[in-house]
Image (tube, rainbow, N blue to C red):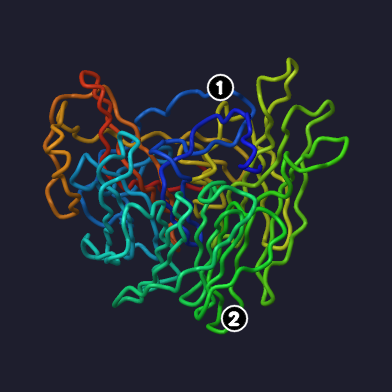
Amino acid sequence: MNAAVPSRRTLLSAAALAGAAALTSCARSGSGSPNSAGRASTSASRSGTGAPGSTGRDPLEDGPPADTAASARSTPKAWRYTHLANTWNGSYQALAVTSPDDVWALGAKGGLKDGKRPTALFLDHWDGNRWNSHPLPDEVTPEGMPWALAAGGPDDIWLASRPADASVPSAYHWNGEKWRALPTPPVAKGQLSWGGGVDGPWLAAAGPRHLWLCVDGKTLHWNGESWHLPELPFNARSITAFRPATPDGTPQAWVVGNEGSVADNCGADPCYPQPASARWTSSGWQRLDTPTYRFPDPVPPEASAQLDTVVHDAERARLWTLGTNDFAQGEVDDEPVPQTIVLTGAGGSWTKRQLPYTGRGVGTSTTVPDGTGSLLLDSQTRLTGDGRIVRLGFPADVPGPPEQPSSSAAKSAAPSSTSPSPSPSKKNSGQSMDCVATCLVPGTRTVLAAGAVRAFLPDSGEQPLRPMLARYDAVEDA
């Protein structure tokens, strides 16, 4: 939908925290403040059923985040915390994983719980033996948010910015020894507002030579030597990619979004934007036939169908894309039920999947495959291979923060992966897991989630955030 003409449609949940992770089988959230649900695709119900219960195992000691030992796994229907940073003043905002021994998490501290711009960024890296604080390029600051991580392979890490303030995006590459700043990308003026209109992964890498960014409804491509702006006949909202089988092979990438806008001049009939998709070829983007969606007549006001996210299941060689068929709710008496769009395919065509009744919106910003052929629609909802919906519980609570942390203490708190955890303090009224980014660990059935533990302190009204990684270990018949 054209952001120049704001839609009055009702979203079932808000956009999640800024940041990204864009590796094969990774997903990220949109811009905004921390939120455990992410941007929601509409489902068969317009009322949520509340947060899932805390049914996970106790948090692990600060060891391997994707340990293969049976004792490290989560329960079949709940997440388990596997790494906690030593601060209640920040959140992880991006995630990239190349193996169980190579995990990258970009975090921010300061201001997040109040909806303000953070004061500092930090990068943590699990190298197979320990967590380390990894240097960031000098140019990387909170002013460039949102920032995204992508991984084309070991020693092949990408970091990019898609600023929400209309400034030019930037990108950096880590080759295992140092960061390299890429040249300034060209401006990509599309039909969406700058820095907005993207819900799924907006950064994707395919090895050390190929990088794509979704910016302002367009895509930017780095070919190892220079940027260019490939032609794309629709508004880009999300992108995924993986490296070619041979060094000189054509990289595999797909982009999804929507074509048209309710603001277009369509004559006597209202415009009805439709889902759109394309795949990368040696000559650029090649459009794919994409299923259409339409409400029965009379069509409700501002009806619009779009694809919000696309992810690649490397373990099953499948693609998944999710979106919405929605409208401006509350304007007519006889309203249809909004739809969640679910499509899957091998890369050249799409097949519709019927989504069972979920009772809540689906946060497409953290959609990720789980290695069994099933799909986490979001951090709370799993679509099994045989079409069932399974709700996933939060991890068990962790020791809480002080009831009323002083502002000076909050400002001085610095994330440290090697410092001991805060000691337990006054009991709070509950916690939630704010999921920002998800990645399937390659070659496993372990999904890692990055974000924050959110504590609710009833006396002070504070909601401090602690950067966290959690794991979900999928079981095929669960």
Q: Residues within 10 Å of mark 2 (few under 14, many from 20)?
A: few
Q: Residue at x 22, y 60 (%)?
A: 131
* Quarter occupied by the N terminus: top right
Task: In the rendered view, tell whether residue 319 sits above or below residue 39.
Answer: below
- Residue 47 is marked as 1
Q: Earlier in the sequence, mark 1 or mark 2?
A: 1
Amino acid beneath label 2: Gly
- Residue 382 is marked as none
Residue 467 locus on image (x, y percent): 28, 45
Residue 25 locus on image (x, y percent): 50, 57
Report the residue marked by disc 2.
249
Q: Nearer the viewer, residue 384 or 219?
A: 219
Dividing the picture into quadrants, the one containing residue 421 is top left
SS label for mark 2: loop
Give me the C-alpha separation between circle 1 and circle 2.
47 Å
Q: Is residue 252 left or right of residue 352?
A: left
How many numbered marks, from 0 up? 2
